[in-house]
Image (spheres, helix red, strand yellow):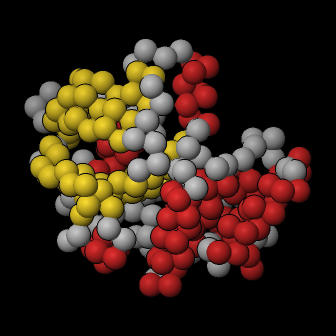
């Protein structure tokens, strides 16, 4: 599913954010990416989401080397990925429902099948967003906007979901609502890569961990309990 081989990323000649990272993830795995500020977590996730390419080494998704794929193959890969970045990207004058619907079809919410609408409503309900479904994104709090981004990523039923601190703006109840949804998606077959600083989540939901430090994977464990 995911293979990183001697992957490095640098934005200047002098310093590499990631330095010769190697990691393999199988279909259906759930992996935490851990590390302090500046460790390279967000950079790694942006590359997994196909937003950036490595400076050196190789990155393969679904068996395709991203440096060698053509445009149509890259688009097909992207359609199989759900991505929740730290800087939530919602369309400010679209409603909550419309923003989530964009994760399913660029054609817009008016052409959605009934079962797709039902799935979106279920996601909104589980994320305590149903009462906001007609609210413009510009009116949302940071935590609400983050949950909309999570619903949008899940609505398409991705094969791979990449989430960068998806509970960072959530209170206790919403944190565990989010994690319950992510676990359910993983149980249903979605491969999950989640960057987090929340040690309570890592302790309670023990999964495989990749711990970054100074641009390298310092510890990789089958099960991580901090």
**Can residue 78 be seen here?**
yes
Measured from the top left, where is residue 183 in percent x and y? 50, 65
Q: Residue 184 appears at what percent x and percent y? A: 56, 64
> Can residue 136 be seen?
no
Depicted 123 relative to depicted 53: above or below: below
Rendered residue at 20%/40% (across/down): 17
Q: Is residue 52 above or below residue 40?
A: above
On the picture, is 144 further left or further right than 124?
left
Residue occupying image coordinates x 44% and y 70%: 167
What is the quadrant of the N terminus in the image?
A: top left
Q: Nearer the viewer, residue 200 or 29?
A: 29
Q: Quadrant of residue 201?
A: bottom left
- Residue 157 position, x and y percent, is 64, 50
- Left or right, residue 62 beside residue 45: right
Image quarter in which the C terminus is found: bottom left
Q: Position of residue 51 (x, y in %)?
A: 45, 36
Q: Residue at image x 84%, y 56%? A: 115
Q: Residue at x 41, y 21 (%)?
A: 65
């Amino acid at each position: 599913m995911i293979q990183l081989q001697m992957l490095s990323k640098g934005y200047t000649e002098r310093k590499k954010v990631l330095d010769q990272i190697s990691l393999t993830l199988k279909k259906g795995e759930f992996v935490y990416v851990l590390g302090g500020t500046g460790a390279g977590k967000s950079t790694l996730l942006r590359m997994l989401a196909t937003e950036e390419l490595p400076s050196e080494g190789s990155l393969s998704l679904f068996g395709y080397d991203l440096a060698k794929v053509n445009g149509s193959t890259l688009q097909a890969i992207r359609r199989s990925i759900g991505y929740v970045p730290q800087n939530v990207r919602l369309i400010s004058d679209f409603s909550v429902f419309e923003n989530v619907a964009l994760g399913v079809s660029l054609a817009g919410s008016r052409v959605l099948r009934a079962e797709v609408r039902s799935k979106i409503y279920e996601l909104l309900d589980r994320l305590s967003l149903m009462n906001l479904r007609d609210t413009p994104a510009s009116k949302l709090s940071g935590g609400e906007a983050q949950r909309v981004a999570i619903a949008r990523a899940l609505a398409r039923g991705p094969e791979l979901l990449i989430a960068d601190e998806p509970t960072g703006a959530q209170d206790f109840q919403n944190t565990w609502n989010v994690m319950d949804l992510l676990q359910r998606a993983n149980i249903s077959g979605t491969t999950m890569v989640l960057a987090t600083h929340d040690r309570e989540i890592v302790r309670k939901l023990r999964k495989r961990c990749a711990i970054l430090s100074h641009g390298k994977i310092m510890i990789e464990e089958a099960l991580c309990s901090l």
